[in-house]
Amino acid sequence: MCWVCEQIAMQFKLSDEQQQFSDALRKWAERAYPFEHRQQLVRGGQGSRAEDWNALVELGLPALGVPEEQGGLGAGGIDHLVAMQEAGRMLLAEPLFTTLWGSAFLRASGNQAALLERVAAGELRLACAVSEAAGRHDADWVEAQAHRNATGWCLSGHKATVLHGGQADLLIVSARTAGAGAESEGITLFAVDAKAPGLKITDSATFDGLRASSVQLDNVQVLAGAVLGNVGQGWEILDGANDFGAALLCAEALGIMEVMRDDTLEHLRTRRQFGQPIGKFQALQHRMAEVALQLEQARSMAWLAMTQVNTDNAVDRRRCVSAAKAHIGQALRFVGQQCVQLNGGLGVSDEMRLTHFFRRAVAIELSLGDTDHHVARFQAQPNFLTA
């Protein structure tokens, strides 16, 4: 049996507590965050609403990734999977994903307990300014510079496509204190206040209805205590946190594909042609069977990623996350395209929620490494041919 097959030979069953958590999130979404509410928020251009964020805080979502010692829940991978799967089902526009992703940086640093306490309390929304235009999907391509001064550090550079940068209270920023180009050595991570002088955040809408920013750092001053981990040794933290973020996206993708499947099944049951529901046509049944198969395979890969993303073995972590992100990227494309086609013209109508779920599916496939990137990354791991 191949290595991936061995890893995904598991049972997918939530504990009673996890099932209750999932049910509570779904009930809240049905009551307080229906699709129409989300669309109104998106059209308004704010990207976030205080009442919705406070509700997520009351449900404990920002505290999931914070250790109990800092007032968080110390949740495991499957708890995060449940949260992000439900976030996908409701097409959540709040910066929950970026806050959970950013929490991974703070946890791994080992020296930011005070910030983690504020995240758990819902006082800090996080965004991760760790990608640059020239680097595409390579996180080790860092041109932003950090220079030591009398009070701490001075940061300069540009970060591209920072998801929820305009809605964040704190940015995780990668900058180079040594080396150049794509060298992993010499990368340092900083926690930067979103209102710091010299920090310019240009917020705009993304095609999937969320918000992203261009972030310009012009001699931004931060204290020495803003460094995450050790100076010049941020790569391992960055690589691990980005894998955690990719695993979160895999979980969100599950919820998105479930909604696209359910909406398409409902359309096949109600749309009639030649005196009968079109869902009775065998050719369309075959296509929905393929959708169901892709979804269940994606589920197994998402569970694989979330159960292995915190392993101490970095090679195994990279293999699991890249295998999951690549497979789920392909599944998102297949499921989305099939569901749009089966809905006909309605599948591309802005009034139908299927269109918006498909847009988010496309964005997830491109985020934190697209399918091709993760296939290449999986192959680049040691002992690829024997794994």
Image (tube, grey):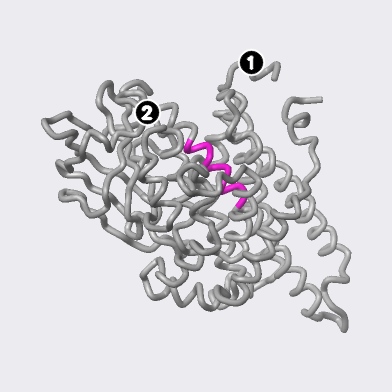
Q: Can residue 337 be seen in this view?
A: no
Q: In this view, does 274 lie to the left or right of 204?
A: right
Q: In which quarter of the image is the N terminus?
A: top right
x and y, in percent, of residue 177 in the image = 25, 26
Q: Does the magenta stretch include residue 244?
A: yes
Q: Name the residue under label 1.
A: 383
Extent of the magenta region = 241-251
Crowd class of label 2 (few under 14; some 14 to 19; many from 20; radius 10 Å) = many
Question: Relative to residue 14, is residue 316 depicted above or below?
Answer: above
Q: Can residue 348 be seen in this view?
A: yes
Q: What element carries label 2?
A: loop
Q: Which of 31 and 323 is in front in this view?
A: 31
Residue type for callout 2? Gly
Q: Mark 2 points at which residue?
A: 234
Name the N-terminal-most of marks 1 and 2: 2
x and y, in percent, of residue 339 in the image = 69, 63
Give the spatial CA distance, label 1 vs label 2.
25 Å
Q: Is residue 7 left or right of residue 256?
A: right
